Amino acid sequence: MHKVGIVGYRGYSGAELVRILERHGHVEPFLLEHREESASSPLRHPQGPAVLPCDPEVIKKEGLALVFLATPPEVSMQLAPPLLAQGTRVVDLSGAFRLQTPENYKAWYQETHSQPALLAEAAYGLPEFCRERIPSARLVANPGCYPTAANLAIRPLIEAGVVDRSAGIVCDAKSGVSGAGRKPSLKTSFCEVTENFSAYSILRHRHVPEVLQVSGLEEREFSFTAQLLPLDRGILETVYFRAKGVGSAEELLAVYEKRYASEPFIRLYNPGAVPDLRAVARTNFCDIGVTLDAASGRAVSVSAIDNLVKGAAGQAVQNMNLMLGCAETEGLL
């Protein structure tokens, strides 16, 4: 059994981590307190995991092999260095370590990065494309939810050369409200969200550079719009592009089938069929369906995930499994 800790367990992603890890056959989870909180929380119960202070010395003494940081970026930057310094490995669910340079982080997050050396060291934790670096990494940056769905749909097509990049790619992305986190705000309050549908961060969403970084696209080739659905969870992304060198949806599907033949969390749909959010709710799957109009070359790929599972906690556990030598699917199937 591996002992692991969760910082930020009261948030939506942190609570999802607790739920997954409690059924994992090879880990013992601990809840780590990094700030003063009220004694009661609807996300805890008396029979749940033990609570420890988020103190590197306590964590070392208890023998925790790995700590999840389900915290805002600035908190992750503060907590990660002392944990790593005393030998505890870290999976960070924030955007703190996802981008490769402090300049890129400054441009998209509008903040100066306080740990540039760790930013350069961190392994990007999208197993389907970055698996070789994850098992030996000290620090894994869990991908954003939007980039996870986008890259899983886009990168195989770019790799195969079946996209007319001169025509650009448009990604129309819709997410449930839990993607904004648990901290109360006017924008995510019930009266603002219910019976409503809105776009935000147009052309400047901070997840865009993750898509570019993994897919290999240039910013001028990619248009991304995030939209808020009046739902608690789920992401559905509709990716529009012009296909080249293929004449049918079956040929596009074959690209995905070849790339994802051994991937346990990718499910592909028959040509012309597409996933919906119910299909992926509370799972670590990414479901993909593709359609093509052969006469015009217009093509659409639809990608669906649960933003709290494959888009956050589930993918974090997938990374943990690789880091600790567990079966990649442990606790997730």
Image (cartoon, helix red, strand yellow):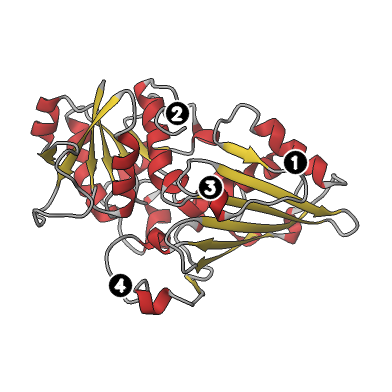
Cα gap from disc 3 to disc 4, whole angstroms: 27 Å
Q: Amino acid at mark 2?
A: Arg
Which image quadrant: the N terminus? top left
Q: Is residue 163 left or right of residue 26?
A: right
The residue mark sitting in front, 2 or 1, is 1
**In the figure, 117 relative to 322: above or below?**
below
Q: Earlier in the sequence, mark 2 or mark 4?
A: 2
Q: Is residue 243 left or right of residue 287?
A: right
Q: Residues within 10 Å of mark 1 (few under 14, many from 20)?
A: many
Q: Earlier in the sequence, mark 2 or mark 1?
A: 2
The residue mark sitting in front, 3 or 4, is 3
In the image, which disc is placed on residue 133?
A: 2
Q: Earlier in the sequence, mark 3 or mark 1?
A: 1
Cα gap from disc 3 to disc 2, whole angstroms: 27 Å
**In the figure, 230 relative to 145: above or below?**
below
Residue 212: percent from left, percent from top: 56, 51
